[in-house]
Amino acid sequence: MQLRRVDDYQSWALEIGARRVLIDPWLSGALVRGAADWVFGRTRPDPALAPGRVDGLVLTAHFADHLHRPTLARLPKSTPVFASHHAARTARGLGFTDVTALRDGQRADLGDELELEAIAPDFPYSHNSLGYVFSHGGRRVYLETHVVNRKRGLERAHGVDVLVAPVQSVRVAGVVFVMSAERAVETARLLQPKTWVATGVDPQHGHGLLQRTLVSCRGTVDDFAARLKEAGLPTTFAQPAPGEAIAVGDLVHAPAAVGT
């Protein structure tokens, strides 16, 4: 099982042989929240991979930077979709015909012996987003895009091979929306993943009125890597470049595969 970084932000793919499952793909165009770019937008400084073969689609949330409508419009509507309830409703509205809505604790079979289990994140996303533990051949990847629920994670994801989660704090009107490097290190201390990979990288690249007035971002990926090392934990840190993959369990990098 390989974990491939699809872009420079928070799109991922799990690959087993030729099989590819995309997670929160954003593969084309800019992101606009609401009716106009001046409210909130984000553009990528680096291009994403072309989708190529897609055997499954996993959505963590219905927010625009997780459920990117222009990308989903490019995918075959017969693609199996596994998603939180809000995201599943939107996927059906976009024409997808094979959609499985999941709640905390539910499991699903993605084919080729790849399974997932849904884990609800911590506040403020407990009821409108999901993290997932992917399992294949004894290897496990836990992906959480906002705030790891350490109680549920400790129960179901302790000692995973790879934990994919944010390490840069995001606050909106003073409320924590994405966990900080300090909380990430404490999460690593409790869950003891073998490897941590950062997602939601550089959230400050957003622009518009919302970003300027209500959103506060703090920390860098390098800050977290240094803190993790200083903590003396057995967890290693890896950050593949867009297009690169990690072979889950042994950290062997695989070459990028662009396009089909």
Image: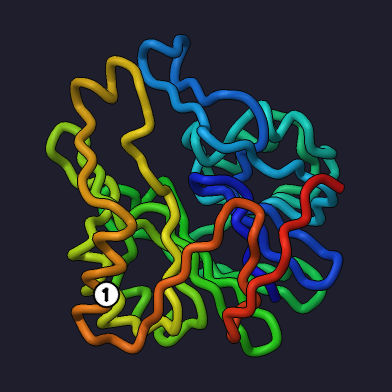
Is residue 14 in sight in this rendering?
A: yes
Per the image, the residue denoted by label 1 is 228
Compared to 115, does 28 lie above or below?
Answer: above
Left or right of 117 on screen, residue 207: left
Compared to 109, does 42 lie above or below?
Answer: above
Query: Residue 183 at what x, y percent from top left?
Result: 21, 65
Corner quadrant of residue 248: bottom right
Compared to 92, does 108 lie above or below?
Answer: below
Left or right of 59 on screen, residue 42: left
Compared to 68, does 146 lie above or below?
Answer: below
Q: Residue at x 59, y 51 (%)?
A: 242
Q: Residue at x 37, y 43 (%)?
A: 202
Corner quadrant of residue 217: top left
Q: Residue furthest left?
A: 174
Question: Residue 203 versus residue 124: which sits nearer the camera?
Answer: 203
Three-letter code for the amino acid on which mark 1 is drawn? Leu
Query: Residue 35 at what x, y percent from top left?
Result: 47, 10
Left or right of 80 on screen, residue 128: left
Is residue 104 in sight in this rendering?
A: no
Q: Residue at x 58, y 46 (%)?
A: 7
